[in-house]
Amino acid sequence: MQKIAILYDAGQAVLSTFDLDEVLQQILAIARDYFHLQNVAILLLDKETQELYVHRQIGWDESFEVRLPPGVGLTGAAARQKRPVYAPDVTKDSRYISSTKNTRSEVAVPLMVRDEVVGVLDCQSEKLNHFDVETIDLLTLFSTQASMALQNAKLYSLERRRASQLQAINAIAQQTTAVLELKELLAKVCLLIQQAFQMCHVSVLLKDEEDLVMRAHHGKLTPRIPEGGRLPAGAGLWGRALAAAKTLIENNVKTSADYVELYLETGSRMCIPLVSFGQTLGVLLLDSSTPGTFKAHDVQPLESVADICATAIQNAHYVERVKQLAYLDGLTGIFNRRFFELRIAEEMERARRFDSGMAVIMMDIDQFKRLNDEFGHLLGDEVLRQVSSILHQQLRKIDVVCRYGGEEFAVLLSQTNLQHALGVAEKLRRMVEAWQFPGVPRPVTISAGAASFPEHGTTRDELVKAADAGLYAAKQAGRNRVCMAADVQRSWAQGSGK
């Protein structure tokens, strides 16, 4: 009768719910109550590592966490031999691994589905030799019901996960195609993936020359590098993923010889190359605080998301390029006045917020009309192009040079004080004066005026007017020199006319 009762209850547990955790908890409760056990646990098999790990337990020490390599412990022996393994006195069995202080006897019964081990039912008693042959046989029969419950719950969980993932992929596709501004897009990508796939942290690293740049990230982990930080493209997991052109998983970063720490708590990481129309744009990084988080079945849905994101990023790049063309001067290839007006407002706001300072240099080519009259407009255009190239090459990446109009140029210097701005202007003046312009038998020179925020103005008009005043003073003082707005009588530097 006991056999019929336990199998009936186990069968009801199998049919009562498809929730994996709930099914396992019911199985444990039945095993505990019918077999009078103090400690009972279900260990599941990680197919990738072949390790057993405790998924649900009753009576075990709460602090006991274990992942058993293949064949280790009584549970490992049961999984490897595919039959129950019994220790009537655990103190005399070298395979025993203690999970509680009061265990005296233990039996481990493999959970099998189609001759494949999916886990182990581990039963422990405070009594010596608690499990007789009949009890072990009964536990073995019970384990078949438990295996069925486990398999059904897993299948249901997998289908539910797939449905949820398809919904997430569809939602990400819809939301990313509507965003064309790159910075906003990348932030949204990280947020959506982190929420939809319940990741600890999501990052997007995009290629920039020989490096990858951290363009966006979102999640719960503590960053070790700032947004905008540069990383060698060939380093770590992403270097290997890019070289192999495929998704790679590192389920225990502590064992990786080339691990690069991006987040303080990372235990495992997945890296997916972002590829659009054959062009590799960068990588999508997924970090988890828990080792062993990423499974083989996670790869396909996340690769689908990565493909969607790569296409959206490429589209945003195209839009960005079109916008840039609207901000480029057709003759010289440097930015135009429209871009200057956009950026000066941004730079002044940044300087105001971070108290970092910024400066404007206004400059123009001396006696450019005379040069055009003497040598013709074609040569004049070439001089404009070469002066633009000199200015662009001598400035930092964070600085901006624009053709303001005609032969006049404007330079925006970020995080700069007045003395540095004057030094930059003088360096540019000397570079142009020393340059040999083909077809022009005499030196080409420039005059410049510099003004800094907030010393010479706190608005766009005040700052440009102050720099213009310096430029006017340089012209009045004989050209080929730099003046600052606050002292139009004194030149910072003079050329041959001093």
Image (cartoon, grey):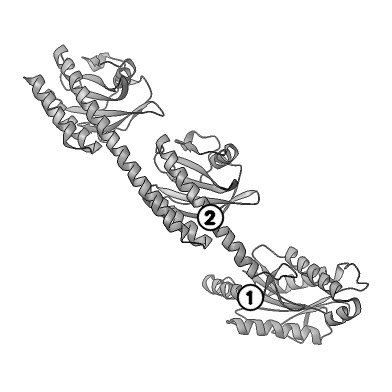
* Residue 261 in the image, given as x and y percentages of width and height: 51, 44
Q: Are marks 2 and 1 in contact (CB under 8 Å)?
A: no
Residue toward you, 377 or 294 = 377
Residue 289 vs residue 320, the one in the foreground: 320
- Residue 189 falls in which quadrant of the image? bottom left
Residue 206 in the image: above or below residue 65: below
Looking at this view, name the residue that lies furthest to the left.
1
Q: Which residue is mark 1?
A: 338
Name the residue type under label 1: Arg
Seen in the picture, residue 491 relative to 86 is either above or below; the reply is below
Q: Earlier in the sequence, mark 2 or mark 1?
A: 2
Residue at x-position 17% and y-position 33%: 15
Q: Which residue in the protein does label 2 denote?
A: 313
Q: Is 454 left, or right, of 127 in this rendering? A: right
Q: Does the image show residue 224?
A: no
Q: Position of residue 475 (x, y in %)?
A: 80, 84
How many residues crowd around disc 1 within 10 Å: few (fewer than 14), some, or many (20 or more)? some
Q: Quadrant of residue 175?
A: bottom left
Task: Determine the residue positioned at 54% across, 34% down.
Answer: 257
Q: At label 2, which amino acid type do we have? A: Ile
Q: Residue 485, how many percent across, how many down?
A: 70, 83
Q: In the image shown, does 351 or 31 lie closer to the viewer?
A: 31
Q: Which mark is residue 291?
A: none
